[in-house]
Amino acid sequence: MLVAIQNSRSATTAQGSNVPQAVEHDGVLYGDYYYWFWGGRMHPVPESFEFPLCDVHTMWDLWLDGKKSQRIKPYRFLKGYDLTDVTQRARLSKANGLMKTLIKLTEKKASEIAPMNANERDILFAATYKSHWLALNPGCTEEYYGVHRAETQIYTSIYETTRAKKRLMNVDDADTHDDAN
């Protein structure tokens, strides 16, 4: 069942001052989430939505939960056409690549991780991120890892490092196969 949400704007009081009533909202509530109509179709984010540039742990939470306070679906359900420009789509693509890598390392599906309580999910994330970080940075010390923990690293940077490492591993594999012939 669709429930239309009326536009709300600043109202003028009898004294003539503007009193903000609520943030402008023209979304439609469907189930637990809002949807917005723009660009000829429905989207799980408003047209003005900007895909965040944040640390890895925050993106993990947004990927699995979305932005519950604003009733925005988990970011794993976003598609490129839900974002208005190339920069936003590139961020989504990088988040998608890194989150899929981390989720694969858990040996679970996102749909199995999402309903976990916050403590269980944080423990799973911490272990998964640390093992991924150590694989990307062999020989790094606990102290070095502590400085580069997930709360201090932007997901796009870790994605780029992961991608470069995978490319390097593929080149090494190709070199090994060439030597075998």
Image: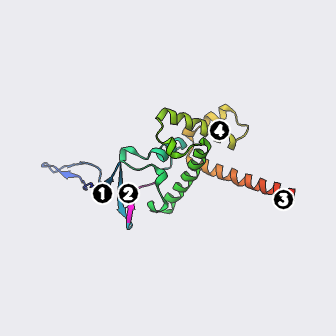
Crowdedness near tag 3: few (<14), some (14–19) or many (≥20) residues, C-alpha within 10 Å: few
Q: CA distance from mark 2 to mark 4?
A: 36 Å
Residue 68 in the figure: left or right of residue 173 = left
Tell whether label 2 touches label 1 (CB within 8 Å). Answer: yes
Q: Amino acid at mark 3?
A: Asp
Q: Is residue 30 left or right of residue 180?
A: left
User: Which portion, as a residue range, is magenta?
Assistant: 41-51
Residue for badge 1: 26
Q: Amino acid at mark 2?
A: Pro
Q: Residue at x 65, y 53 (%)?
A: 163
Labelled pair 3, 4 in contact (Cβ < 8 Å): no
Q: Is residue 45 magenta?
A: yes
Q: CA distance from mark 2 to mark 3?
A: 50 Å
Is residue 148 placed above or below 175 in the rendered structure? above
- Name which residue lies at 70% across and 36% down: 140
Helix, strand or loop status at disc 4: helix
**Which residue is the site of mark 4?**
131
The residue identified by callout 3 is 178
Label located before the other in sequence (2 or 4)? 2
Badge 3 marks a residue whose secondary structure is helix
Residue at 20% x, 52% y is 11
Q: CA distance from mark 3 to mark 4?
A: 30 Å
Query: Label 1 sits on what residue type?
Result: Asp
Tell me where residue 29 appears, x and y as whole percent.
31, 53
| Residue contact at pointers 3 and 1, CB within 8 angstroms | no
